[in-house]
Image (spheres, rainbow, N blue to C red):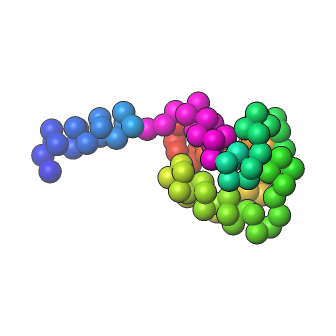
C-alpha cells in the first residue's frame, strides 16, 4: 500500500469510530431488546446485574452481545469491577480507545 492509500484507510476508519454517546445509545437499544426491559432503566448509575437480572450464564450471553454489537472483545474477567452501567461504559470506552 502506498502512503496515500494508508492515509485514506486511516481517515475512513477514524470517521466510522463510535463516540461514547453512540456506544451508550446502542448499548441501551440492544440490552433492552435482548433482556426485555425498558431502555429507560439502563442509566449510568443503575446496577448492571440487578437491572438486567443477570445470573452467571447471562454474563456469557452479555459478553457475546457486546462483541457482536460493539465489536469489542470483553472477557468475563473484565466484569469483576463492573457494578453500574457507568462502570461498563467506562470499560467499553477504554477498550475502544475513545
Residue at the (34%, 41%) spot, across then down: 13
Question: Residue extending furthest left?
Answer: 2
The segment highlighted magenta reads: 17-30
**Magenta segment, prevailing SS (helix, strand or loop):** helix
Residue 24 position (above or below residue 37): above
Q: Position of residue 30 (x, y in %)?
A: 62, 47
Horizontal side of 49 relative to 22 (left or right) equals: right
Horizontal side of 13 relative to 45 (left or right) equals: left
In this rendered view, identify the residue nearer to me: 33 or 70.
Answer: 33
Q: How many marks?
A: 0
Image quadrant where residue 53 sits: bottom right
Horizontal side of 84 relative to 8 (left or right) equals: right
Q: Position of residue 60 (x, y in %)?
A: 69, 66
In this rendered view, identify the residue nearer to me: 6 or 83.
Answer: 83
Image quadrant where residue 42 sits: top right
Residue at the (80%, 43%) spot, across then down: 84
Amino acid at each position: 500500500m502506498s502512503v496515500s492509500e494508508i492515509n485514506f484507510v486511516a481517515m475512513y476508519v477514524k470517521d466510522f469510530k463510535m463516540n461514547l454517546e453512540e456506544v451508550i445509545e446502542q448499548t441501551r437499544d440492544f440490552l433492552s431488546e435482548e433482556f426485555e426491559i425498558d431502555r429507560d432503566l439502563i442509566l449510568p448509575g443503575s446496577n448492571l446485574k440487578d437491572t438486567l437480572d443477570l445470573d452467571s450464564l447471562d454474563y456469557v450471553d452479555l459478553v457475546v452481545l457486546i462483541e457482536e454489537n460493539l465489536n469489542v472483545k470483553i472477557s468475563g474477567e473484565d466484569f469483576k469491577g463492573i457494578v453500574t452501567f457507568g462502570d461498563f461504559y467506562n470499560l467499553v470506552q477504554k477498550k475502544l480507545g475513545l
